[in-house]
Image (cartoon, grey):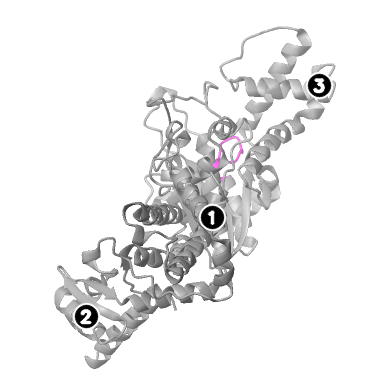
Amino acid sequence: MLFHEYLKNEIFKIVKKLLDDNDLDSDFLKTNSFNIELSNKVDFGDLSSNVALVFSKFFKTSPEKLAEIIARELRQNKHMQKVEVIKPGFINIFFTNLFWQNQLSQFIKLDGSYNYNIKPKSICIEFVSANPTGLMHIGHARGAVLGDTISSVLEEVGHNIKREYYINDAGEQIKKLNKTIIFHIENILKNTTNELFNDLYPGEYLENIAKEIFNKFSIKNLNELKKFEKNIIDFVLNDIKEDLAELGIIHDNFVSEKNISSSDNINKLKNKLLESELAYYGFQEKPKNISDKDWEKKEQLLFCSKKFGDDSDRSLMKPGGEITYFMSDLLYHINKIERNFDVLINIWGVDHFGYVKRLQNALYALCKENFLLDIKLTSLVNLIKNGEKLKMSKRKGNYITMREVIKEVGVDALRFMMISRNADKTIDFDFDSLKIKNKDNPVFYVQYAYARCMSILEISKKKIKEIEKGDFKLDYLTLYEEKMLIKYICNFYNVIKSSAEYFEPHRITNYLYDLSKIFHNYWGLGKINKDKKIISGDDDLTKSRLVLVQIISLTLNKGLSLLKISSPKSM
């Protein structure tokens, strides 16, 4: 049993006994938890816990007093060298060297296979879903990598995952796309260079798509073009799929909005909403940014949003009978629920913030099935070059595409940076720093740690063969830096599990960077003190340290692989 689970079990036993001794109910233990944190300073021990701060209210005592009681019990454990209580009630734990050596031994025996002990769920994760009206930009890249990595992490712990792309192939944006392509083809047919109208999509990309369609189908006149309008979306979508494949992203399903929004499905949902008294035909309130003289009241189907705390009831169907985005999203999510997914995860841009609760409230009110809808909102990505933020406008057609970024910095850097922070935090994507080979370039720093491990192992082939036969001891691993490395290694699966639980893959990128930093520092000790060299004159000591290096390399490789980032053996 690795330390995180071991220590939690030991503390739970103590708390449970205290509750029983005081005739207190222990049911809250099932739903209340506490943290076990790695200590980064030698004075704070190996591990620290906030258990007393979490549970003191149940014992009606101060956190510090409860911490002293728990610490007294923990000191009886033979693996614990020292247990301290620090105000306002933290418990710092110092384990013996033998405990950490045994922990590394247990990690080695796992051989890359770990039981995360979770109940598998069927999960649909919908991400990217960029409108097929142009190439993907850097904002799409963040949602793409986040969704794909969350999927990989959830698969790693044992869930059944479907990666899904919702194609917005209906509505006004598709009409605008078709009009733009028709405009460009009309220019070709008439050999004219008319300038784009304001209500069309700008940029060279769609002009090039128009040329492709014109050449592929040998279009002679505009009447012929009508036959090929349905192919326009496919042309753009194929480019999007190519960009995603370049990033290592393959979706399992592509779901069409047009197919989901059939008249039959619309009528079924409309009737259900009316029967459930969740919708009614009425008049929407006048938007604040429209004057009285410009506002015309028209009856339409409205969702009872006010029942759920919204400031106004929201439109489901426009006065002319066309459905709104809200209605379309309800149809799509009901379809997912009908496909028996336990969990629905959506990756959306932060501009959808005000829309999240509305959709969740409507779905939970409509559907009685047991499901969870979790929506992760991604914040902005600032592109920085030569110390300045690049200004972009998709509206003007001068945005930087994802394929341009990949060409400049590579797939590995893009994937790592897009999940380097929590989804709700802005990312500064600095082109220049991602080309420099130092610790300011995080993906290089982690990959270089792996390459450095492989270099050490490569020049120690003879000893590695002895190690593979079991000819090694771990007793020699007594340095503080070695203990830190073992702690981080043995926390690896806990990081993955928590990353899956909270849908936060940045926990893994942070972990890999921290592990790499500790390893680089460990490697550097040999330059200062020859006794701390990994490969030394002491054969047994060298083999112990080589085992540690080997496990570090395997951990880094597995972590990078989980993120779909390469692990180069030399750099």
Q: Is-magenta flag for residue 478? A: no
Name which residue lies at 40% across and 67% down. Answer: 486
Give the secondary structure at mark 1: helix
Instruction: Between residue 4 and residue 453, name the one nearer to us.
Output: 453
Compared with 290, 157 (above or below) is below
Quadrant (top left/top right/bottom left/bottom right) for the N terminus:
bottom left
Q: Count up the numbered dots.
A: 3
Q: Name the residue under label 2.
A: 71
Q: Name the residue under label 1.
A: 454
Q: Of the residues under marks 3 and 2, which one precedes in the sequence?
A: 2
Q: How far apart are marks 3 and 2 (CA)?
A: 78 Å
- In which quadrant of the rendered view does residue 9 lie? bottom left
Disc 3 vs disc 2: Cβ atoms closer than 8 Å? no
Instruction: Between residue 110 and residue 52, name the one nearer to us.
Output: 110
Give the amino acid type for the residue marked by disc 2 in the picture. Answer: Ala
- In which quadrant of the rendered view does residue 183 lie? top right
Residue 405: which numbered mark, if any?
A: none
